[in-house]
Image: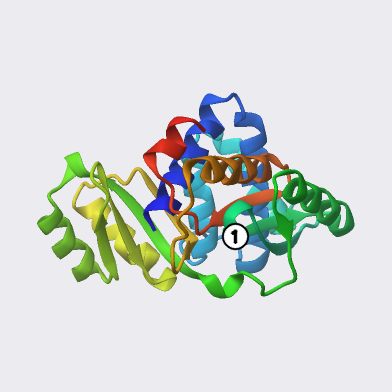
Amino acid sequence: MAGHSHWKNMAHHKGIVDAKRGRLWSKLSRAIMVAARNGGGDPVMNVRLRVAIEDARAVSMPKDNIERAVKKGCGELEAVSFDSLTYEGFGPGGVAIMVDILTDNRNRTNGEVRKIFERGGGNMGEPGCAKHMFERKGLFNIPASAISEDTLMGLALDAGADDVQNLGQSFDVTCDPTLFAQVKAAFEKANIAPTSASITQIGKVPVDCDTETGQKVLRLLEALDDHDDVQQVYSNLNVTDAMMASS
């Protein structure tokens, strides 16, 4: 779980710092469009849309862009139709990887993502080969400076969360995806601002690798994340500080 959180924080940081804001906005627009298409344009009633909009706001995506994406998803504006897919595979060291995709061309994306896996020392597998190694959860990362562990534990569990894990500088709070909005609202009411909040896939059993292998996995995850059609990348790698320091 800790490894997952560290990778997502790193990916989020790189998405901003490495001048990839435009590409990130494009990915988030797709996510908003698909969420609106599947669940309607009201974020109060559509949790997936609400999360997508909050993600967009978190990286300063303009309000006009967000509203335009919602209208496209609802059919009020002409838009490309995207298919939602999940690819599964393995990286160096046998690390399991899942990749959420939104694409307007399945064949192109399949070939391109497969090549990224191969170039990164991994391989893309058949559907179901890795999914059983993950579980879908709501995940919040809370700075340790914001609240004590005991107070957070009480607040989170009262709100319906499953677990609170102490990572040293921060806490990971997990919950059932259906309770994501409820737990988030409890944090907002207590004036606790998570560093990140998402509905994600978490590895059931983290895989330990040596530093060199772990760095290869991180490079593969980043290469996958850089693809325009990739929305999210998940792995069950147990990320260490040494891996992060040289990534």
Between 136 and 70, which is closer to the camera in this rendering?
A: 136
At 60% from the left and 60% from the top, the residue drawn is 94
At 60% from the left and 71% from the top, the residue drawn is 131
* Residue 25 x/y as whole percent: 62, 37
Q: Is residue 233 visible?
A: yes
Between 217 and 140, which is closer to the camera in this rendering?
A: 217
In the displayed structure image, the side of residue 161 where residue 178 appears, left or right: right
Farthest residue in the right direction? Answer: 107
Between 139 and 66, which is closer to the camera in this rendering?
A: 139
The answer to whether 69 is drawn above or below residue 63 in the figure is below
* Residue 223 x/y as whole percent: 67, 40
At 68% from the left and 62% from the top, the residue drawn is 89
Q: Is residue 78 visible?
A: no
* Residue 204 x/y as whole percent: 44, 69
Image label count:
1
At 52% from the left and 49% from the top, the residue drawn is 53
In the displayed structure image, the side of residue 173 where residue 117 appears, left or right: right
* Residue 177 x/y as whole percent: 43, 69
Of the residues shown, which amino acid type is indicated by label 1? Answer: Gly
**Which corner quadrant holds the N terminus?**
bottom left
Q: According to the image, label 1 marks what residue?
A: 94
Colouring method of the image: rainbow
Find numbered disc 1 in the image and state the secondary structure of the residue it sits on. Answer: helix
User: Could you classify mark 1 by the number of other residues whose Cα lies within 10 Å: few (under 14), some (14-19), or many (20 or more)?
Assistant: some
